[in-house]
Image (tube, rainbow, N blue to C red):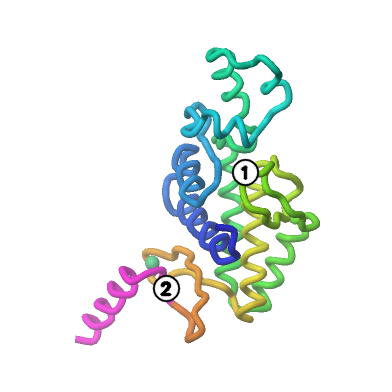
Amino acid sequence: MHSTRAMAERAVDLCVALLYEEPSAESVARLLRAHGERAVAEGEPAEDAGDSRAEVMPVEGVRAEGVRAEGVRAEGVRAEVARAEVVRADDVAAMREAAGRLVEVLAAPGTDAAAGLLNRILADTARPPRLTSHGGASPWHVHVDAHDDVPWAEWFLASSAMALAVLLADHQRVPGGLCASAGCRRPYLDLGGGSPRRFCGTRCATRERVAAHRARA
Ligand SMILES: [Zn+2]
């Protein structure tokens, strides 16, 4: 779940949702959950609110002795949805800006240009690497954002840039691209060893092949 590849895939999925679809706090929160993040849209009840959340995310005062009556506990659970777990409309706007910078990296004309763009993003957003288990809620993994409660956009930009940087270093090339289909241009990840991919998926590749065939006929 925290592999570099998974983080890069999450980054590309989020970029597509944020820039090529009509994102809402709900749709972004849903996508974050699909990638294993605890996220709720503003106003949305926390799906897994309950004892397990109360166990893993203790908040001072909420778990005080004797706070066990149902009503009081329900209120406590609500308060335990950490601030950074709630996705708001302004988070989506800030994440769109971050997505724009990440797509620029994937659209870079070459490895050197992509590395330069990533270095600029990392200089702007990344902090010294640190290990976190989110209070025991997940296995230990490395974060490069400032702390566990930074706004979604900061987390998204820092963690995605880090993942893309590691992949660039691993493969010595831009770790993705933009779909060559003129009507698509969506970003994709490209970690294959062979010749670089040109399309986001088989649908675009097939459409373009058929069009090229017709043009020749
Ligand atoms: Zn495409």
* Point 46% across, 51% down: residue: 17
Q: Position of residue 145 (x, y in %)?
A: 72, 51
Q: Say if 70 sits above or below 212 in the image.
A: above
Image: magenta residue range:
198-217
Q: Quadrant of residue 5?
A: bottom right
Which is in the foreground here, disc 1 or disc 2?
A: 1
**Residue 167 is inside the magenta segment:** no
Q: Quadrant of residue 57?
A: top right
- Main SS of the magenta segment? helix
The kind of residue tagged 2 is: Ala
Assess disc 2: are there few (<14), some (14-19) or many (≥20) residues with their C-alpha within 10 Å of its C-alpha. some
User: Residue reaching furthest right?
Assistant: 128
Which of marks 2 and 1 precedes in the sequence? 1
Q: Which residue is mark 1?
A: 137
Placement of the C terminus among the 4 image quadrants: bottom left
- Crowd tier of the residue under label 1, counting other residues whose Cα lies within 10 Å: few below 14, some 14–19, many 20 or above: few
Front one among 134 and 203: 134
Mark 2 lies on residue: 180
CA gap between label 1 and label 2 equals 41 Å
Q: Where is residue 21 shown, x and y percent of the image?
A: 42, 50
- Amino acid type of the residue that numbered disc 1 sits on in the rendered structure: Ala
User: Where's the N terminus, which quadrant?
Assistant: bottom right
Residue at image point 63% right, 37% down: 56
Q: Residue at x 48, y 69 (%)?
A: 178
Q: Position of residue 75 (x, y in %)?
A: 58, 18
